[in-house]
């Protein structure tokens, strides 16, 4: 009986440490991915993206799109922080391992092209943009700074971590409305349902 208890405890510790290690590994990789995003290191971001995304849009095209978005003379976009809050259990389907990553992101949008306009115009523009962002992210998650002509958006979001034998290490796939068709075509429905609804 004593040996059985010892064996069960050993197994439990092994399972716990394994669960911990996949969580730690994904969190570490996700944080590197987010750090690249914050630093606008787009090659680094794309290295961590699940490569099947490039079947839909070539890597060079995605990089050009990111550079264009982040270097617009009209609007400056900055990620202030991206922090992993939780990693789900793993689920394996056809030798591919999936996990959901829950994170909090803070983003700042500064409307550079509006900064030298008359005060009334600036106020009207910022109010309009805040209203648009409020409807998308919730008013409680959007703060405006009239002096800087900027909005700070706080959002909780999810993405999928995918370990596919075809590629090295964990890769990531954003999970938002804009990516829905792509996510649905890559991540099986059973995986999406189970991992995203995990308590």
Image (cartoon, rainbow, N blue to C red):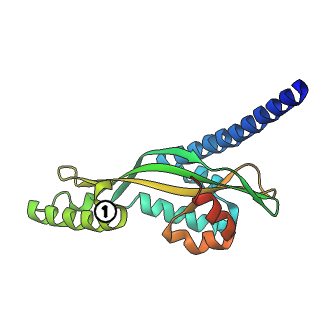
> Relative to residue 80, is residue 74 drawn left or right?
left
> Relative to residue 89, is residue 104 drawn left or right?
left
State which quadrant residue 4 falls in.
top right
Q: Residue furthest front?
A: 1
- Characterize the local packing of mark 1: few (<14), some (14-19) or many (20 or more) Cα atoms within 10 angstroms: few
x, y percent for residue 185 = 66, 73
**Local secondary structure at mark 1:** loop
x, y percent for residue 175 = 55, 63
Residue at 58%, 59% in the rendered image: 196
State which quadrant residue 18 falls in.
top right
Q: Is residue 113 visible?
A: yes
State which quadrant residue 96 falls in.
bottom right
Residue at 52%, 44% in the rendered image: 85
Q: Is residue 55 visible?
A: no
x, y percent for residue 42 = 55, 53
Q: Nearer the viewer, residue 35 or 170?
A: 170
The image shows a total of numbered marks equal to 1
Residue at 27%, 57% in the rendered image: 112
**Tag 1 residue:** 74
Residue at 57%, 57% in the rendered image: 159
x, y percent for residue 110 = 29, 55
106 in relation to 112, above or below: above
Q: Which image quarter holds the N terminus?
A: top right
């Amino acid at each position: 009986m004593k040996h059985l208890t010892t064996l069960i405890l050993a197994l439990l510790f092994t399972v716990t440490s394994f669960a911990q290690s996949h969580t730690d590994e994904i969190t570490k990789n996700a944080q590197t991915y987010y750090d690249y995003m914050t630093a606008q290191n787009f090659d680094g971001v794309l290295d961590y993206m699940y490569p099947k995304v490039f079947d839909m849009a070539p890597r060079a095209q995605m990089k050009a799109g990111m550079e264009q978005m982040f270097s617009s003379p009209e609007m400056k976009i900055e990620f202030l922080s991206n922090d992993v809050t939780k990693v789900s259990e793993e689920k394996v389907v056809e030798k591919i391992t999936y996990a959901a990553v829950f994170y909090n992101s803070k983003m700042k949008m500064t409307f550079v092209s509006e900064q030298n306009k008359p005060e009334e115009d600036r106020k009207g523009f910022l109010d309009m943009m805040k209203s648009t962002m409020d409807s998308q992210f919730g008013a409680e998650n959007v703060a405006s700074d009239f002096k800087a002509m900027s909005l700070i958006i706080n959002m909780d979001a999810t993405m999928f971590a995918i370990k596919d034998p075809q590629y090295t290490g964990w890769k990531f796939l954003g999970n938002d409305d804009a990516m829905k068709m792509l996510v649905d075509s890559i991540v099986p429905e059973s995986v999406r349902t189970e991992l995203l609804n995990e308590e």
